[in-house]
């Protein structure tokens, strides 16, 4: 791996993965591959121990119900209000959106985007494609599974990638989202973007 | 930028997104909505739950496409459906209808007693049952993207699912620790494709997820299966054969997420009515045992 191992300075950065349901281990593996400590977050108190949070792929409807049932809703909003970085992949992107195209109410409502769920169709329409991502020289191997896309990105949102004119990756301040699943590939470049955000946020916090 | 549909990553990945979740059997729109509201990660649309299939006897086939459509329009979570073992056309019909996953299932009467489907030919992913690593590896070899224990469906008795999960886990561990020159003999003994065993040995785990299925009747059963290494849980007759399906469904979901929080599981279990009445596997004759279907 030629990439910078972003976590090897100071004490290791701790990146949490919301551990209610979905592709949790896959994210942990990538986090560890980049030299950070991966923490599976099963209880809201654990949020205080981590520098950044990943909302993984899975079923957004299920995750939302478990977020409510186990008292994660306000603590995650607070985590974001403290400018701690959050990375939502697929279902995670649905969870952080301010608006969903089928209903005006989003879930956590942390990012100024409107997301369309299952936007590419059902599972038989799931696909892989090479994607041009802003700042990456070589296209990124993106895996879209019953994936959403961003129908509308409001001002202050940086679009990082589009697929056939639909926005599939974006960033706003301390929040990063992808409609695809970086954790299902061996390519850690996308997670590296998040690790950099976490690194910057720690620097700001200590200054 | 070209779109590649139905790749191995996409098919296996879909099952990875279901991990830590519960997939529930439903027979109509109302049940599908209860399942979704309880936090199920997917529903399995079928005409009868396994315990009713058992009671009804006769030939059990793919569900009426109208029913599958009804369920698909009722929920936004993924919808799975069952096709008979080896029934190419039932599987193709379900694929054409756009179901998200097909279960090539021994719960239905097999259409082919010799050949399973060549699942790698399909765009839609498949889940298959397995009792041991040989069976698991053969199904992966044919292109299954997800596995589940066979258990003994419709009995409300967890014993067979436990047996199958423990067996696969133990055999994976054995293969992982084996020396290279022992692997071909193991492939022969298990009746497993050598290349698949090779992959398992190199990765130290199965290349696809393995859920528990067949006999999960209580939240504690679901948690037990997670405890011994299941990636998630299928609940067939358990939910809608219980006294209060809503409560029961939600309790199973919570017990699966927090499978080692015993206080919680105790609390969840207190509030439930009677679970489905179980069947002692030893009282089933050989022909009544669904797990013997397929090879």
Image (tube, grey):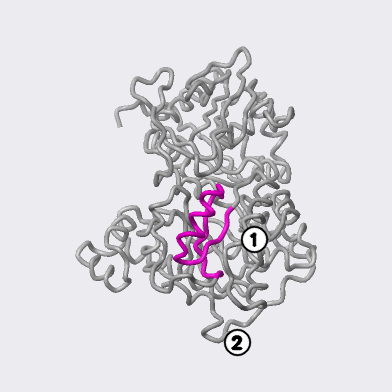
Quadrant of the rendering where the C terminus of chain B is positioned:
bottom left
B216 relative to B140, above or below:
below
Residue A7 placement: quadrant: top left
SS at mark 1 in the image:
strand
Residue A35 % position (x, y): 40, 35
Residue B139 placement: quadrant: bottom left
Residue B25: which numbered mark, if any? 1
- 2 or 1: mark nearer the eye: 1
- Magenta-drawn stretch contains A137: no
B120 relative to B271, above or below:
above
Q: Please indicate whether residue B257 sits to the left or right of residue A73 in the image.
A: left
Residue B116 % position (x, y): 41, 65
Residue B194 % position (x, y): 27, 62
Classify 10 Å Cα crowding around label 2: few (below 14), some (14-19), many (20 and above). Answer: few
At horizontal 59% and vertical 31% (from top left) the residue drawn is A93
> Which span of residues is magenta-colored?
B80-108
Residue denoted by label 2: B283
Q: Please indicate whether residue A185 sits to the left or right of residue B32 in the image.
A: left
Q: Which chain is mark 2 on?
A: B
């Amino acid at each position: 791996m030629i990439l910078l191992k972003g976590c090897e300075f100071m004490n290791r950065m701790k990146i949490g993965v919301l551990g209610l349901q979905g592709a949790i281990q896959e994210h942990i593996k990538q986090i560890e591959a980049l030299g950070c400590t991966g923490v599976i977050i099963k209880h809201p108190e654990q949020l205080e121990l981590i520098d950044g949070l990943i909302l993984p792929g899975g079923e957004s409807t299920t995750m939302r119900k478990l977020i409510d049932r186990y008292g994660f809703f306000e603590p995650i909003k607070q985590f974001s209000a403290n400018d701690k970085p959050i990375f939502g992949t697929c279902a995670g992107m649905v969870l952080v959106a301010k608006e969903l195209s089928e209903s005006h109410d989003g879930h956590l409502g942390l990012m100024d985007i409107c997301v369309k769920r299952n936007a590419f169709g059902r599972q038989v329409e799931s696909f892989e494609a090479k994607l041009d991502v802003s700042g990456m020289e070589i296209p990124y191997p993106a895996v879209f599974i019953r994936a959403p896309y961003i129908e509308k990105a409001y001002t202050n949102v940086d679009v990082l990638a589009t697929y056939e004119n639909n926005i599939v990756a974006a960033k706003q301040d301390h929040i990063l989202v992808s409609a695809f699943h970086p954790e299902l590939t061996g390519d850690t470049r996308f997670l590296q973007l998040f690790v950099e955000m976490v690194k910057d946020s720690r620097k700001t916090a200590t200054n | 930028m070209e779109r590649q549909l139905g790749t191995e990553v996409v098919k296996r990945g879909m099952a990875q997104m279901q991990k830590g979740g519960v997939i529930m059997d439903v027979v109509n729109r109302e049940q599908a909505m209860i399942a979704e509201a309880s936090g199920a990660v997917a529903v399995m649309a079928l005409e009868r739950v396994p315990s009713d299939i058992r009671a009804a006897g006769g030939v059990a086939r793919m569900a009426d496409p109208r029913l599958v459509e009804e369920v698909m329009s009722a929920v936004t979570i993924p919808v799975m459906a069952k096709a008979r073992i080896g029934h190419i056309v039932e599987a193709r019909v379900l694929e054409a209808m756009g179901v998200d996953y097909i279960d090539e299932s021994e719960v239905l009467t097999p259409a082919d007693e010799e050949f399973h489907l060549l699942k790698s030919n399909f765009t839609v992913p498949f889940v298959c049952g397995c009792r041991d690593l040989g069976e698991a590896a053969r199904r992966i070899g044919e292109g299954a993207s997800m596995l589940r224990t066979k258990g003994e469906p419709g009995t409300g008795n967890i014993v067979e699912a436990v047996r199958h999960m423990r067996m696969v886990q133990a055999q994976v561990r054995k293969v992982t620790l084996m020396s290279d020159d022992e692997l071909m003999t193991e492939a022969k003994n298990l009746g497993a494709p050598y290349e698949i065993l090779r992959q398992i040995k190199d990765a130290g785990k199965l290349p696809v997820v393995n859920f528990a299925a067949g006999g999960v009747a209580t939240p504690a059963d679901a948690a037990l299966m997670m405890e011994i290494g299941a990636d998630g849980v299928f609940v067939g007759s358990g939910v809608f054969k219980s006294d209060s399906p809503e409560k029961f469904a939600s309790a199973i979901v919570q017990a699966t997420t927090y499978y080692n929080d015993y206080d919680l599981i105790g609390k969840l279990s207190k509030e439930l009515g009677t679970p489905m009445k179980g069947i002692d596997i030893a009282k089933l004759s050989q022909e009544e045992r669904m797990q013997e279907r397929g090879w």
